[in-house]
Image (cartoon, rainbow, N blue to C red):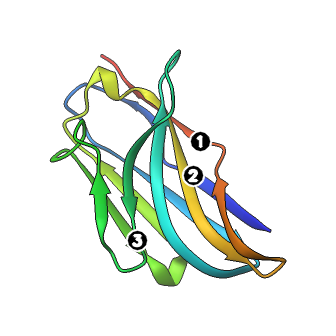
Amino acid sequence: QVQVVESGGGLVQPGGSLSVSCVASGHILSINDMGWYRQAAGKQREVVAIIGKDGNTKVADTVKGRFTISRDNAKNTIYLQMSSLKPEDTAVYYCNVAAIATTLPRWQTYWGQGTQVTVSS
């Protein structure tokens, strides 16, 4: 089994910065892509940024130039550094991990419980 836990959300003023992190743990054989998604109230979940094991990244146009995703493979951890935050960035941010668990030897995607990011004055 693979556990995914996000941390670091909170309340920030417009124009401010905030970082969130995500760690995958458990009986992990291998991890491929890791990424951040978000879901605002009343809207569908959307991709924010994805990072591969090799460090290649894909970032949504809506956050490009403001958000940076990074990864520490040794710690099975990814980070999302958010700056110039806008009220429309308010959402629950979810971490997604593509991994193979020792107990289930095929690729699966695992989700965290999410962390709330609120941008408001």
Which x, y percent locates residue 98?
Answer: 58, 65
With respect to residue 47, does 81 lie above or below? below
Percent x, y of residue 44 = 51, 26
Sequence order check, earlier mark of 1 and 2: 2
For label 3, the residue is 52
Numbered disc 2: secondary structure: strand
Residue occupying the far right of the picture: 103
Which residue extends farthest front? 106
Mark 3 or mark 1: name the one nearer the start of the chain: 3
Badge 3: how crowded within 10 Å, few (<14), some, or many (20+)?
some
Q: Would residue 4 be found to the left or right of residue 6 on screen?
A: right
Residue for point 52% across, 18% down: 41
* Residue type, label 3: Gly
Residue displayed at 66% across by 57% down = 110
Q: Amino acid at mark 1?
A: Gly
Residue that mark 1 sits on: 114
Front in this rendered view, residue 107 or 48 = 107
Marked residue nearer the N-terminal end (3 or 2): 2
Which amino acid, mark 2? Glu
In which image quadrant can residue 1 be found? bottom right
- Residues under labels 1 and 2: Cα distance? 6 Å
Q: Give yes or no for contact between labels 3 and 2 (Cβ–Cβ under 8 Å).
A: no
The residue at 22%/41% (across/down) is 61
Lateral position of residue 1 relative to residue 39, left or right: right
Residue 97 image point, x, y percent: 57, 62
The answer to whether residue 108 is left or right of residue 102 is left
- Give the residue pinned by disc 2: 6
- CB contact under 8 Å: marks 1 and 2: yes
